[in-house]
Amino acid sequence: MEQTLEAPPAVAAEAPGFWLRGGALVLDNFLVSAASALAGALLALVGLPQLLRLLVNVVLAAGYFTWWPMAHHGQTLGKKAAGLAIVRRDGADLTYGSLFLRWLGYLASAFTLGFGYVMAVFTDRRRALQDYIGGTCVVVDAPVSKGRKAAIVFAGLLIPLAAIVGLVAALAIPRFASMQSLAQEAAARASLSQLRVAEKLYEGDNNGAFPKDLAALSPKYLPQTPPLLLGQVHPRTAAVTVYGAEACSGSKADGQRILGTALKDTGGWGLVVAAGAPCDGDVFIDCTHASGEGQEWFRY
């Protein structure tokens, strides 16, 4: 009589809820990421090349998700906190091979943009892609209190949310700073135009004479000398530095009359008072640094 071999009995323990399981996994990933960041920083200090540091991080992750549950009855730290455990689907003992395949399944789930994890909502015994690859499933090992469940689920939601907020901030803050810098530069150019218009009006009312100080333009032609703020290059100031003929380039070949090497780079306003000099009466921004457009400020 031919004997029929039956497959090992499948695990009958209770399958956990999707959100509890997800929270446990997020906690595990957070711990691995923190350990990897610390190891990477230490290895960078000793001068280990970036490629080797990356390899160490991969080994850390593989070791945690393979060795740790093998040595702790199918539990990672996150799963232990949630009262869960990894078991073989066929009821056999866990092996390093099955757990390593399961870790590769995590990578596959990530590459599917998380669909491999979402599979646990619809599949038998709420198995995710990594469970199918490793021949495992996750079961309730020791039920935990409702308060702990809520904390783990909350952490599972909060940690990714914090990461997303951090990523958005990392992208938005430099962008905001760049926009702020552009606005400050536009304001500086607008203020320069206002001063030059006010000076022309002054010249017209004073028989072609230029003001000896920009304060002479206020309040008739300008409410006050506008302040300048050139980003991180110079602090906010409305100070005026008066130059003599030494600030004149002596050449109009490129349309520029101010000699940058003669400037004090104060970050304020510059005014040339030198009768007979080619740049007499010129008002400019006394800064030799480049603007966001790549042009030195005194050249505007």
Image (cartoon, grey):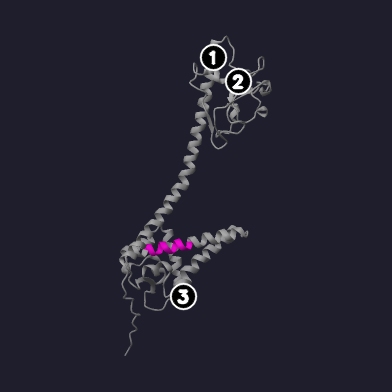
**Image quadrant for the C terminus?**
top right
Q: Nearer the viewer, residue 55 or 286?
A: 286
**Image quadrant for the N terminus?**
bottom left
Which mark sits nearer the N-terminus, 3 or 1?
3
Q: Which mark is residue 202?
A: 1
Regarding mark 3 in the picture, which secondary structure is present there?
helix
Q: Position of residue 46 (x, y in %)?
A: 62, 60
Q: Nearer the viewer, residue 201 or 120?
A: 201
Regarding mark 2 in the picture, which secondary structure is present there?
loop
Instruction: Answer whether labels 1 and 2 touch (C-beta < 8 Å).
Output: no
Residue of label 3: 71
Q: Which residues are magenta?
A: 22-32
Which mark sits nearer the N-terminus, 3 or 2?
3
Q: Residue at x 38, y 59 (%)?
A: 155
Q: Which mark is residue 282?
A: 2
Mark 2: which amino acid?
A: Asp
